[in-house]
Image (spheres, helix red, strand yellow):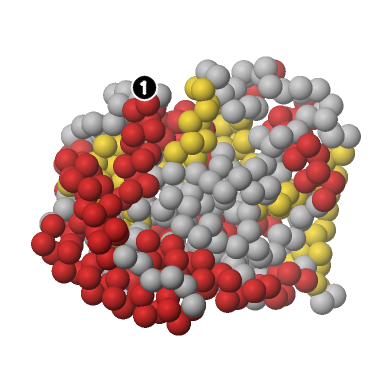
Amino acid sequence: MANTILVGAQWGDEGKGKIIDVLTEQADIVVRTQGGNNAGHTVYIGKTKYVLHLIPSGILRKTKVCVIGNGVVIDPVGLVGEIEGLAKIGVKVQENLLISETAHLVLPYHRELDEQREILKGKNKIGTTKRGIGPAYGDKAARVGLRMIDLINPVRFEEKLKIKIKENNEVLKAFGAKPLSFKKVHDAYRAAGDKLKPFVANTVVYLHKAMQKQKDILFEGAQGTFLDIDHGTYPYVTSSNTTAGGACTGSGVAPHRMDRVMGVMKAYTTRVGEGPLPSENSEIADMLHGMGREFGSTTGRARRCGWFDSVATRHATMVNGIDDLAVTNVDGLDTLEVIRVCVGYRVGGKTLDYIPNDVEVLARCEPVYVDFPGWKVSTTKARRWKDLPPRARTYLQALAELTQAKLAIVSVGPAREQTIML
């Protein structure tokens, strides 16, 4: 397997959690490289559903080591809750988890600021999860953030937190929001720091020593390509680099040490939050929601749904350097008579085969569709490529050709065994 980066090739929620879990069987170490607890990875093992927010999905396999890299922003109280929640259902988190000492912290004032800024934007809101991720990355960029290395140093943490609480309380007052109690924040986060201290390490050194020992490493991305702060549909994006480059900066492993990039995409398109979605379609959205599908694992919000957008996924292949594709949720299309694929955008009398960077132009784009006949039978029991209906195989091959990457994995349901390896 060597070193593999796994990224979302759409707007997030592509089913990365399951694909990571499947690939982890071949890996020694799984590294989360960016984002925070605004992300959610869902994994089904048997009849048990696991929803992970900060801890890599590899934690569900006993012999694997999981690393939370320097590019992640961590809510310590939330992370402790996640560890304790896993323990209650029999998943031990001990020496199998390492946390970067240079990962930045998400603190209560980040969450308050996130919410107040969304309220202020009104109809122009971005649609954040209000978990404080943007303000935490903002502090990191402004060089005023607190890190895990500060949290586990009681004296330093108290000194720095006093300054930050005082500064941010003034901002919150200007918003008309209630100021935070230094003591409550300090005591809660120091208690979390004591519990997390055994996991904190220099993860860059750890990963390079592991590579010297020929260990196979899987780099786990959160969100998706078009939520990337640089390459996404700005400003309707997250605050980190969700593309393959973020795996390098978020882990401390150089680009030339990466062997493969796998892109995960649904057999259709979804998005949570605000921003343009050219192939959005109410018919397919109603169908999927009626099946109980496409509700966010972090927020519970109904996802916006549309037909497969090959213009977007082809761009994702270019930006990420995607070698292999994993296509998920194929079974979600099993009942359809006709399945549409967006192959271009029409705007201003022109037809585009790329995503325009101007979000206002993108919002005006009309999709150009090609129709495929549906297969009208269940794919959920398929375990080999030849088990899939011929029309499903034709559809999947077309998606790979349009996306310009090799089809490697097909998922026909949430369970581990509902996976076809090509």
Q: Which of the two residues, 312 or 161, is positioned nearer the viewer here?
A: 161
Q: Which of the two residues, 371 or 381, is positioned nearer the viewer here?
A: 381
| Residue holding disc 1 | 90
**Which residue is found at the position 18% from the left and 46% from the top?**
194
Q: Is residue 382 visible?
A: yes
Q: Which of the two residues, 405 or 24, is positioned nearer the viewer here?
A: 24
**Residue type for callout 1:** Gly
Q: Report x, y in % for residue 412.
A: 65, 27
Q: In this view, does 411 lie above or below 346?
A: above
The quadrant of the picture occupied by the C terminus is top right
The image quarter in which residue 406 lies: top right
Q: In this view, does 47 lie above or below 43?
A: above
Q: Is residue 29 visible?
A: no
Q: Report x, y in % for residue 382.
A: 67, 19
**Which residue is found at the position 17% from the left and 64% from the top?**
158
**Which residue is found at the position 48% from the left and 52% from the top?**
38
Q: Is residue 256 above or below residue 170?
A: above
Q: Which of the two residues, 255 or 219, is positioned nearer the viewer here?
A: 219
Q: For label 1, count other residues whose C-alpha is less than 10 Å away and answer few (under 14), some (14-19) or many (20+).
A: few
